[in-house]
Image (tube, grey):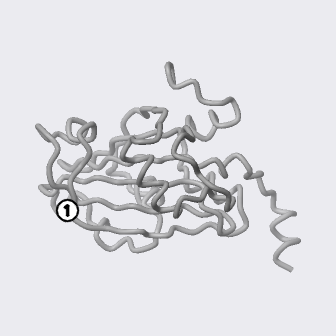
Amino acid sequence: MGGVNAPAALRHWLTTGASLTAKLKAHSLAFRVQRLRQRSGRCLSDEAAAIGLPRAGRVWEREVLLRCDNTPVVYAHTAVPVAATASDWPLFSALGERSLGSTLFGDPQVRRGELEFARLRGGHPLHERARLALGGLNGAGGPLPPEQILYARRCLYRRHQGLLLVTEVFLPSVLDLVLQNNTTIMMNRS
């Protein structure tokens, strides 16, 4: 995480080696994936090299908000080269509002790369997409100003010959999450 200098409270979210989906579920009573779009698009210039493209080009992309107790806490962007075959990523096109993380961590053929970290300022394409996804609001309903620094991580996944790049942008509201224990969950469900 070298030069990113993320706040201490955010570091455990950024550096978790386990499934982010599982961690978010443990910190909420109701977790859900809100699919914003899944379509053909143009990858960002810094994504191209990571997924083996000589320059920014066409990819299959997926954008979602991860919500805990209906509050958006993470904006996620996935890029897959259009050359990837259905055997490389058989479930990608049919995910709908299911968690990609659960699919990736549940498939023994998927190899996970190293996590990379970034501090995103207003004007960065992923910062702007996250703001647009929120309608200009942060997860708690207040404004998410363009000057708000957001912290992100990304990871490259391999399956057969296919590459898939997942970037997760952590919204300020992720800091409000509290680990739920079984007693709390049971009390709130009765």
Quarter of image, res 139: bottom right
Front-most of residues 141 and 52? 141
Please tell me which residue is depicted at 29% across the width and 52% down the height of the picture. 79
Residue occupied by mark 1: 87
User: Residue 138: x percent and y percent?
Assistant: 61, 55
User: Residue 168: x percent and y percent?
Assistant: 47, 47
Label 1 Cα neighbours within 10 Å, binned few <14 / some 14-19 / many ≥20:
few
| Secondary structure type for disc 1 | loop
User: Residue 96: x percent and y percent?
Assistant: 40, 74
Front-most of residues 105 and 10? 10
User: Residue 108: x percent and y percent?
Assistant: 38, 52
Quarter of image, res 42: bottom left
Question: Relative to residue 190, is residue 43 drawn left or right?
Answer: left
Front-most of residues 134 and 106? 134
Report the amino acid beneath label 1.
Ser
With respect to residue 24, does 54 lie above or below? above
With respect to residue 181, does 120 lie above or below? above
